[in-house]
Amino acid sequence: MSDDGEAAAWARASHAAALFAVDPLGSGVSLRAPPGPARDAWVALLRDYLPSGAPMRRAPLSISDDRLLGGLDLAATLRAGRPVAETGLLAQADGGVLVLTMAERLSGATAARVAGALDCGEIELARDGVSARQNARIGVVALDEGHDDDERPPAALLDRLAFHLDLAEVSHRAVEERCASAAQVAAARARLPLVVAPAKAIDALVAAAARLGIDSLRAPLLALRVARASCALRCADVVDDEDLAVAACLALAPRATCAPPIEESDIPPEETGDEPASAKNDADPKNDNAQPREAPAPDDLIVAAARAAIPADVLARLATDARTRAPSVRGGKSGAALVSARRGRPMGARRGALREGRLSIIETLRAAAPWQPLRRAHADDAGLAVRVRADDFRVTRFRERRETTAIFVVDASGSSAMQRLGEVKGAIELLLADCYVRRDSVALVAFRGKSAEILLPPTRSLARAKRLLAALPGGGGTPLAHGLDAAGALAESVKRKGQTPLLILLTDGRGNIDRKGAPDRAKALDDALDAARRLRAPGLAALAIDSSPAAAARADAPTRKIAEAMNGRYLKMPFADAATLSQAVRAAAPAP
């Protein structure tokens, strides 16, 4: 991004911070930026704009319901002798802002609870024997550290946030300017109740949202709030075209899913020396019959402002892309879920030793409570208020979501490039679409010549995968062992991230390049079998698809030997199409 582009991005973000601080409750900001000076400067700017007494609370990614919503305050309950509710982060942030860190990985359940607080301005607490209603009038700042288009905060939360900002490419040099002072923002906050929005302004925002392909009804409502805040910030009482343009740039443009065509009437005619006399007469102010030029409709002005705010490459993509954003009716798993002792979302408690997990104090006391009269009668420790034994210990169980990453190891050598490479590309595209529904990932390792390379790291980005697949070349030797070694290293990396790797090898098995890069068919097969046995040790789920035309007639096919060495499934595909390959891969995926 150029210096001018960085300055413009920061100017928009600074303006959005001021407008959000004018009217924060029930709205929010999605800020895409990695941890760094730009993000820290924006958060500090917002803190300066907010009222001095407004709380700003940070919610970690793995926040539990006890911390977010509240629950039983054990210490206060023991002191008072009756159940006392503990205030959660949502209630603690009442009248201020809740900051969600790593929002792109936020669970749907947590997003739903935050969205409920945004909608209602309060939370109803009914858990751990406590029933209470607490105010939670909050604004939300979702810090998005995602890199791909599919790494976004949950849609239910994004739909409720007025501003979608991107400072990913803004450096610290561009963060000095601010659009308003804290005093100006405070004055605008006091003036906001007096601001009036005409009916035609509301109609224009709704019409503009429809022309931009925005199907959410919250978008024009949030844009109206932005327009009113803009009006208050410039010390006016009635929303005008300038405020509508600001709302279009900051609230509607980031949500646009299509680029409306430019009307011919919006394009000024080319000036020529031979202007018709009738036109000159119409333009002559002395001519009483001259017709005044028709002013553009308000929604035209809003759409034009939104178009100007959309980056050129995005605008071109919107204009040519025919994709729809309707939700799919097809379901699928979102990743294998397993019980964990240390991390994930809480899912109750069970009996266990302290070394087996995190102690649940409330459940432990509940288990010990019925035994207190008996223990007081037979124990010497009369000074203890509560007597807890090892059998009373309850440890919290957590449900940890584990994604599946399908690692395709593709033979792009000369022996198979003309036979199966096209079908392999089709299979990966089909599987990637399925993985996108299940929120799983796909990686691509290709081997040809004398080496192997990771063409596509684990991703769920359909567009990125298709671009790389289309450009995948073929030809050269077959370094099969190098491909398996690279896949094994990638699988270990995937496992360290808490994901489950699935290895899919697509080859004719006719390796002719050994590990040293020398052409030796016999040594190449031995090296490939050794690499396959190394993959068997960690217990990876594997599938070997033989793309050789003669595979059906060979009981000792090299690919079959490799599959046996990996302890994987072998599949002969002499005449299979891309859909059949995709079905076979899904069948080999590890069960949740």
Image (spheres, helix red, strand yellow):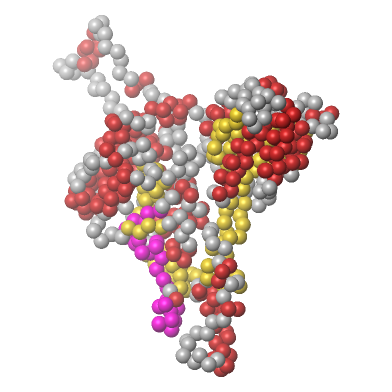
Residue 374's x, y, as percent? 58, 90
Residue 131's x, y, as percent? 46, 72
535 vs 234, left or right, is right
**Res. 580 visible in picture:** no
Residue 71's x, y, as percent? 46, 70
Pick the quarter of the image with the N terminus. top left
371 vs 60, left or right, is right
Q: Residue furthest left?
A: 286
Where residue 119 sits, quadrant-wise, is: bottom left
Where residue 292 sits, quadrant-wise, is: top left
Which portion, as a residue range, is magenta?
75-100
Which residue is found at the position 72% from the left and 37% from the top?
Answer: 529
Q: Which of the two residues, 454 or 242, is positioned nearer the viewer here?
A: 454
Residue 8's x, y, as percent? 29, 34
Residue 79 within the segment the image draws in magenta: yes
**Res. 519 visible in picture:** yes
When the figure is inspected, residue 465 is found, relative to residue 18, above or below; the finding is above
When the figure is inspected, residue 113 is found, relative to residue 497, above or below; the finding is below
Which residue is found at the position 75% from the left and 27% from the top?
Answer: 548
Q: Residue furthest top?
A: 274
Where residue 281 sits, quadrant-wise, is: top left
Q: Which of the two residues, 517 or 475, is positioned nearer the viewer here?
A: 517
Which residue is found at the position 77% from the left and 36% from the top?
Answer: 560
